Image (cartoon, rainbow, N blue to C red):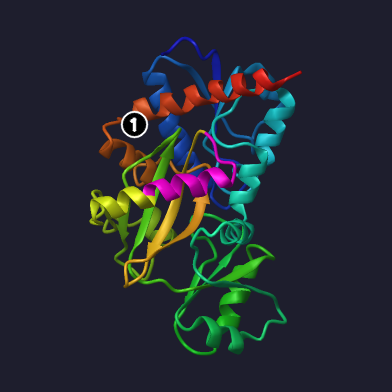
Amino acid sequence: MSGNYGKVAVLLGGRSAERAVSLNSGNAVLAALKRGGVDAHGFDPAERPLHDLENFDRVFIALHGRFGEDGTIQGALELMGIPYTGSDVMASALAMDKWRTKLLWQALGIPTPEFEVLTAGTDFAAVEKRLGLPIFVKPANEGSSIGISKVKTTGGLQAAYAEAARHDPLVIAEKFVGGGEYTVGILGTQALPAIRIVAANEFYDYEAKYLRDDTRYLCPCGLPEAQEREIRAQALNAFRVLGGRGWGRVDFLMDESGEHYFLEANMSPGMTDHSLVPMAAKAAGIAFDELVLHILDMAAVAEKRNDAHVG
């Protein structure tokens, strides 16, 4: 497959709170592309002007968080006419916003945990009573569990709101679902094997995702085969209704009675040695280097599809 891509920029780093994770993802992708004979180069938009991308034929987006997976960089690349990996402007912006993602899923009957939007004027005691404890509080537009708190005691919601609001003015409180945390990787039209995540600490936070070595990832995930197959199909649908294309990841929770609830979608998932999509791909028989090239291939397919609709 190598040799057909031209000069490829791997976007990494960036200006978001997830810069360090993005550098790890981007460098892993860059190394894989080079092993495949691709003329690939790292490109950090925090350190170089975007117009330098006009010297490249294709872009692999390994940016995380704001300005990387929220539609911002996608819009710039659309304007420059450069094909890029992953979802387009609308899908990226929508999936980055957990509140609007949940509103769309609710409208279409896709199960998602109960939630409320919090503001400084919220009756926090009433929300605690309605959702029950514990409650997860999170910024609507951050990733990697940045700014998330688990409220376990009565009266703790207001402080959790203040912490989340430091990262984003839009904050949601979400009902706790405690039967297990899972994820489904999406690759083209395929939903990859589900992974169950078992964190050794309180929940699957930034530390558990990137710094600890005692987080357990179970694949096979332990669900009955028929149930997993159905959830994977629903995850692919949940991804598509947001406008997702190329690749991504959909996270879901199980409750104690065996019901599942979709939590959020990620349109630019991690590609580090702790990352979930590469784990799921490996379980499906797809090696890391093959995965990276396949994602890059889909950038070209997306461009051709767009060209076919011009005029």
Where residue 202 sits in the image (x, y, percent)?
A: 36, 71
The residue at 71%/32% (across/down) is 76
Where residue 283 sits in the image (x, y, percent)?
A: 26, 39
Count of numbered circles in the view: 1
Quadrant the N terminus occupies: top left
Location of residue 223 with respect to 125 vertically, above or below: above
The magenta-colored residue range is 232-245
Count residues near mark 1 (Cα–Cα under 10 Å), then give few for <14, some for 14-19, many for 20+.
some
Where residue 242 sits in the image (x, y, percent)?
A: 59, 47
Where, by quadrant of the figure, is residue 301 drawn? top right
Task: Identify which residue, 264 or 153, lies in the foreground.
Answer: 264
Q: Which residue is mark 1?
A: 288
Where, by quadrant of the figure, is residue 270 drawn? top left
Relative to 153, is 11 on the left or the right?
Answer: right
The residue at 62%/55% (across/down) is 97
Where residue 137 sits in the image (x, y, percent)?
A: 54, 71
The residue at 51%/15% (across/down) is 5
Quadrant the C terminus occupies: top right
Task: Identify which residue, 252 or 236, lies in the foreground.
Answer: 236
State whether residue 20 appears in this view.
no
Location of residue 174 with respect to 104 vertically, above or below: below
* SS under mark 1: helix
Q: Which amino acid type is marked by label 1?
A: Phe
Location of residue 9 with respect to 132 vertically, above or below: above
